Image (spheres, grey):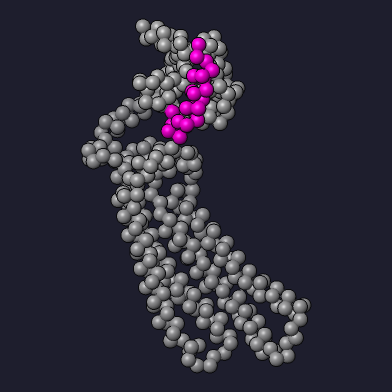
Amino acid sequence: MPEKDQSSKTEEPTPKRLKDAFMEGQFAQSAEIQVTFGLAASFLVLLFAGPGVIKQMGALAVSVFANLATYNLTEASVAAGSREGIVLMGRMLLPLLGSAFLAAIIAGGLQTGFRLTPKVLEVKWSRLNPVTGFKRVISKDVLVRFGIDLLKLGAVIGILYVAMRRVLNDPIFFAPVDVSHVGTFVAETTLFVLARLILAAGTIAAISYAYQWHKTHKELMMTREEVKQERKTAEIDPHLRNAQRQMARRILQRQMLSSVETADVVVTNPTHFAVALKYERGVDKAPMVLARGENIFAMRIKEIARQHEVPMVENRPVARMLFKFGRVGQTIPVELYQAVAEILGFVYKSHRYYFHRLGARRLGSLA
């Protein structure tokens, strides 16, 4: 965003601005919060459910090693032991995975207020633009993200270092211990590491969320003119506003229908969508959308096209994409250049008689 535009935004965002931004997916959120919730959920499961499972695993290990000399290794005994081990592991892993999944949902819901933002799922062609993509690569956000990643890396290294020093002092490495101590050792070490990971992840999540909130709030700031315009719009009677919209829609439809006769081609779906395109070499930078419609309005576009012998090409995917992403009076999306160029090349060759008269018709429409 240009600095001069950003500096003119001195007003706090209105509730409507915040609501619209939220529906677009523009609100403070941090992936680190979900990580923290997941770690905390795993910690609680291990703290309360872990000891019982560990005792069972220890008892199983003692039983196996104590009877190792007399243990009869057969296909049936190995299968039975494997099943018992898998059940014990499942009793430990399933609660961990389930709690982490539930915690991730809760963390995401807390950030969104448990509200849906369906517009986030819509395709935005601007994200595929290499220029804007390059700007995002060298933006301030990338540097902040890099700094947060460095914090996470440093936290993990520091926690592992402290954990290793603590672990190496355990009697298990330099004195005979009971077999059951292995389970206790693993459980205590895991809880020790998890507790410190939660503390570090929570701190980093708070920093990340604070930055995201500040950044989003700054982007949503408004100019005085925007606030005044929003107030004027809000003061208009809803019925009058709907009438104005309907009138504007009818005027736009009339303008679209009147421009169909000067189109180069009408791309159809064949019955649901119709999009009229124009391209004047040396005048237009790219093919432009003159009219677009679906169902009944698409039939009217095609009727006018037939009356004026405008070429019509049936191309289901292109018609659907042009209707969804094309805007009347604007050039088509860059991603559709190749497909539309092929369609125009076809009609230029197969309808030469039409294009001989099209220039005069366009001059007549301007007179």
Residue 367 sits in which quadrant? top left
Furthest residue toward bottom = 176
Residue 76 sits in which quadrant? bottom right
**Residue 144 as seen in the image, left or right of residue 156:** left
* Residue 111 spot, x, y in % from top left: 43, 51
Query: Considering the image in quadrants, where does the N terminus appear?
Result: top left
Q: Please say if 274 is above or below 20.
A: above
**Residue 312 as seen in the image, left or right of residue 366:** right
| Membership of 227 in magenta stretch | no
* Residue 19 spot, x, y in % from top left: 40, 39
* Residue 273 spot, x, y in % from top left: 55, 24
| Dominant secondary structure (helix, strand or loop) of the stretch shown in magenta | helix
At horizontal 35% and vertical 46% (from top left) the residue drawn is: 134
Q: Which residues are magenta?
A: 332-353
Does the image show residue 300? no
At horizontal 57% and vertical 17% (from top left) the residue drawn is: 299
Q: Nearer the viewer, residue 361 or 11?
A: 361
At horizontal 51% and vertical 82% (from top left) the residue drawn is: 185
At horizontal 25% and vertical 37% (from top left) the residue drawn is: 5
Q: Nearer the viewer, residue 283 or 62?
A: 283
